[in-house]
Amino acid sequence: MMTHTQLKQLITEAVLLLVLGIALVIGGYFISSENANKRMQSLYQTRFEPVMKSASYEKVTSKALNGFPEIKGVYIGYNSTGAAEGYVIDLTVKSLYGKDLSMLVALDYESTRITGLALEPSDDENAFYISKSDMEKISDKLIGKQIPIAFVKEEKKDDKKSDKIIVPGLNDGVYYAQRLYDDRNRYIDYVEMEVKNGIITRVNWDAFSTDKTNQDRSEAALKGAYVVSGLDWATQSYNICHALLECQDPDRLAMKSDGTTDIVKGVTCDIRPFVELTMECIANSRANYDKQKYMIGLDMILLHLYQKDAEDLEYINDDGHIVFSFEKTPEIYTVYNEDNVAIGYMGVMEIEAKIRGITIPNYVDNTGTQTGNNQNGNQGSGVVEYDGAEDGLNSGGSTDDQIFTESLDDLPMTEMASFIEPLSDRYDQTRTVVKACNTCYKFLKEYLNWKVT
């Protein structure tokens, strides 16, 4: 017969065995899980090494992927310290003739510039073929470019030593854009740009106060009434304008997410208003929507809202600027999605077209919606004129003479960050790779909830 002491010892041993068993099971699970993770990371590193070498990778899970059936997987790469380095996007897109191209696209985590491209092997008879040498040439054009990307014929100045890129599609004239709302200091930023022979030759960035008795921002800065860190604001404005004249393309100013730039000497202020208004001026130039038409359009918006123009409302200052903030009526210039979330802003040209009931042919607005052809028969009204081209390709002429304009991959040209020439005699191949890159942009725009203006 078992004594009380023996029973107690037996129970203790049973409990110890149970605890030991549980510990072994848990330990085995973690060891197995760790081994599985190591195997997965090893597979990731082997597969992604051609486009981005990282210490580890994490697969992204997001509802945003539901809208992009082309994308098979999105991964974030991390360095040895755990800092995010970039994205690797695995996707398959269709060529112009319906064949499938599978590839990996690597993007810098901060700037979303392309850091790597690689074709994925495929035994599918419907696969789109790009030779290794052609892919290397296409990659040379795309690596380092910020997405999204459009096609353009690059031109250079007569001076062979100059590598200045000419912004495509500019019409000569004086173009203007101003913010439709004032900042916390009651200033409204504006940019005036002059184009000659398709080149930006003059640009001015300043701001006027909604209090018409106050000085413009540059004058206030020179007199010490408006202070920013670093050099006075007027000098910084001059420096950034001069930098644009040198590089021509606002994207090359390398504006960061906080609105600053590290590449223009002496500029520490927020350049976002300048970049956005410069892009609007470029869009206006492409549409032949000069300063005079802009002011008429701004007047029309006031008439639409208040049944009086700027002069009757006494909103014109001594310099001829229309000094009015639409801050209380954001619906006039804000673009909303179906969930009533702001996803972009319209410029005066687009607002005027909307008020007049003009449909811009083949124009894609900031919501990504294509408007189609003009149904009102007033395409030639002279108010808003676009030389629309399906898929951004002008009709007629040889491939070498074609300049790509207006929209590409359902993205408006005003949203394009970089421009390249298609590889000579390999347009289809270049076009399909660019389509893959632009698909990555559209996903990240949704995933990161970017507000593109």
Image (spheres, rainbow, N blue to C red):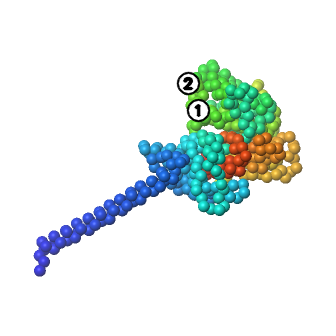
Question: Which amino acid, mark 2?
Answer: Gly
Q: In the rendered structure, which disc, 1 or 2, sits on the residue that comes first in sequence?
A: 2
Outermost top residue: 223
The numbered disc on residue 261 is: 1
Q: Taking 96 as reference, is 314 above or below it?
A: above
Which residue ends up furthest to the bottom in the rendered image?
A: 1
State the image quarter where residue 323 is shown: top right
Q: Residues within 10 Å of mark 1 (few under 14, many from 20)?
A: many
Image coords of residue 95 (percent x, y): 69, 55
- Residue depicted at x 65% and y 47%: 134
Q: Nearer the observer, disc 1 or disc 2?
A: 1
Q: Between residue 176 and residue 404, name the one nearer to us.
A: 404
Tell me residue 352's x, y (percent). Answer: 79, 43
SS for dot 2: loop
Q: Nearer the viewer, residue 313 or 384?
A: 384
Tell me the amino acid under the disc marked 1.
Thr
Nearest the viewer among 390 and 400 is: 400
Can residue 293 be seen from the camera position used here? yes
In the picture, measured across the screen, residue 293 lies left or right of residue 417, that is: right
Residue 295: mark in rendering: none
Task: Give the residue displayed 82% in from the left and 44% down from the top.
Answer: 397
User: Residue 230: which numbered mark, if any?
Assistant: 2
Q: Helix, strand, or loop for circle 1?
A: loop
- Which quadrant is home to the N terminus? bottom left
Image quarter of the C terminus: top right
Name which residue lies at 30% across and 63% down.
Answer: 24
Q: Residue at x 58, y 56 (%)?
A: 121
